[in-house]
Amino acid sequence: MNLDEFNAVIATTRLTASNREAARAVLVDQRKRPEVENEFGLKRQRMQQILDVVNSAAEKFALQQQTQIVPANQIEVSLALAVRAARAELGENITVTEADHRVDRNFTGRVIAKADFHIAQDVGRGNVVVHSLARLAQVPAVGDAVTLEYRGGRAGIKDRAAPELGRGR
C-alpha cells in the first residue's frame, strides 16, 4: 500500500493518531511488526486489531472506488449489470435478450436479478429476458415467479405466483 492509498483509507477509520502512525509504519514503510509494537508500546494483539481495522477499511474503500465510476449512460450500465447478474446466477452459456415493448407478448418465469433500471427473468431452457423497469406497471421482486404481459408498449403482471404443479385430487 502506498502513502496516498493509506491516507485515503485511514481517513475512513476512527483510529487515534498514534495507532494510525503504527499502521503506516507497518503497511507503508514496511517496518517489522515487533519493532513497531515496541516503538509505540503496543501488544501483539492490539497491533493485529489495528491492522485488521485498516485492512477492512481498505477493502471497503476499494469497493466504493469501483462502484463510484459513473458512466455517462446509466441505463446501459443497468442493462449490463442485469445481464452480469443473470450470468452469475445461471452460467455464461445463457441466451439473453431484451424484451421488445413494441410487440404484444407474454414472458413467464422467475425474476433472477434487479438493477437500477432493469430486471432479468429466467424464462427457461437457458433463456433470460431483460425488462426495462420504465415499461413495467409493477416491479416484481427478485425470486418472484411471474408472467409479464406486454400490451401497447407497457407490461403488467398477469399472475404473481408460480402455477402449482401436481395438485391432483
Image (cartoon, rainbow, N blue to C red):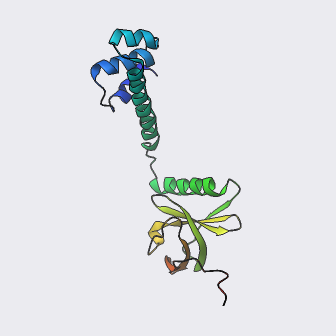
164 in relation to 81, above or below:
below
Residue drawn at x 30%, y 30% as measured from the top left: 14
State left or right for residue 143 relative to residue 64. right
Examine the rendering and report whether any part of residue 139 can be seen: yes
Q: Position of residue 79 (x, y in %)?
A: 53, 57
Q: Position of residue 117 (x, y in %)?
A: 46, 61
Q: Quadrant of residue 146?
A: bottom right
Quarter of the figure with the C terminus: bottom right
Residue drawn at x 61%, y 53% as measured from the top left: 88
State left or right for residue 81 relative to residue 138. right
Q: Position of residue 110 (x, y in %)?
A: 58, 69
Q: Quadrant of residue 27?
A: top left
State left or right for residue 47 relative to residue 165. left
Q: Residue furthest bottom?
A: 169
Examine the rendering and report whether any part of residue 28 can be seen: no
Q: Position of residue 161 (x, y in %)?
A: 54, 77
1 in relation to 128, above or below:
above
Q: How many marks?
A: 0
Residue drawn at x 44%, y 42% as measured from the top left: 69
